[in-house]
Amino acid sequence: MIYLVGINHSFQVRTKERVSLEQSISLCQNFETACRFEKYLQKLVDQITPEAICEEYNEECLFVYGNGAYSIAKNVCDNHKIQHIFCDPNRQERDELYVANGTTEDEDEKNCFPIRENEWLRRINISLPPDASMLFICGAIHISTFKKRLINTNALTVEVICRDFELDYPY
């Protein structure tokens, strides 16, 4: 079983250390929602007991927030002692992926993200057994397309738990 949660990517990260004023303003605007998301994710993992949490994110994205930044999903995985997988390619990997497929990121988006989403599937498939239950966190824009891709490609059972965290759980 694959459970999908859609989110604004800015709510996927928190920081433990002081950051620059510019970063601080950005983090403060999202801090409350990120805290709510972390609590939500903790409860969700307790309820559905997935074997892993996969996310449309990569370690490179954390560097924007400084040394103390961490993935909320990875933190939840560490607390529950389950596997965590960053599924999104970093900037260089993404550029190479589009070159190899003879297209651009904009074209991929216009075509409903087949290249990026297939890369997520590839990374999941090399990291988890085929029948593993997982929670997958992705941008809300990917919920419909990734659900279809999961069902069509792997004939998996997929449940959308949350289409857009910010809209579905505003407080």
Image: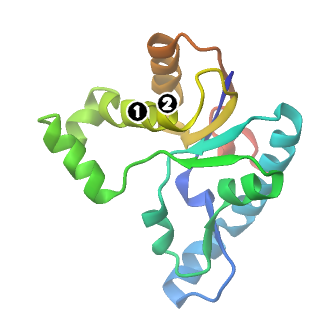
State whether residue 104 appears in this view. Answer: no
Reading the chain from its start, which is encountered first: label 1 or label 2? 1
Total numbered circles? 2
Question: SS at mark 1?
Answer: helix
Q: In this orientation, which residue lies closer to the viewer: 152 or 168?
A: 152
Number of the front mark, 1 or 2: 2
Q: In this orientation, which residue lies closer to the viewer: 54 or 103?
A: 54
The location of residue 151, given as percent across then percent down, is 52, 13
Where does the N terminus fall, quadrant-wise? Answer: top right
Task: Answer left or right for 55 relative to 157.
Answer: left
- Which residue shows up at 45% across the image and 19% down it? 149
The location of residue 167, given as percent across then percent down, is 67, 42
Note whether 62 is above or below 119 in the view shown: below
- Which residue shows up at 17% across the image and 34% down it? 101
Task: Give yes or no for contact between labels 1 and 2 (Cβ–Cβ under 8 Å).
Answer: no
Label 1 crowd (10 A; few <14 / some 14-19 / many >=20): many
- Which residue shows up at 81% across the image and 58% down it? 79
Q: Quadrant of residue 6?
A: top right
| Disc 2 target residue | 125
| Disc 1 target residue | 117
Please state which amino acid type lies under the numbered disc 1.
Glu
Task: Answer left or right for 127 relative to 73.
Answer: left
Question: SS at mark 2?
Answer: helix
Please state which amino acid type lies under the numbered disc 2.
Asn
The location of residue 169, given as percent across then percent down, is 76, 44
Q: Quadrant of residue 38?
A: bottom right
- Which residue shows up at 74% across the image and 46% down it? 82
Report, in whole angstroms, how far the alpha carbon at label 1 lies from the one at label 2: 12 Å
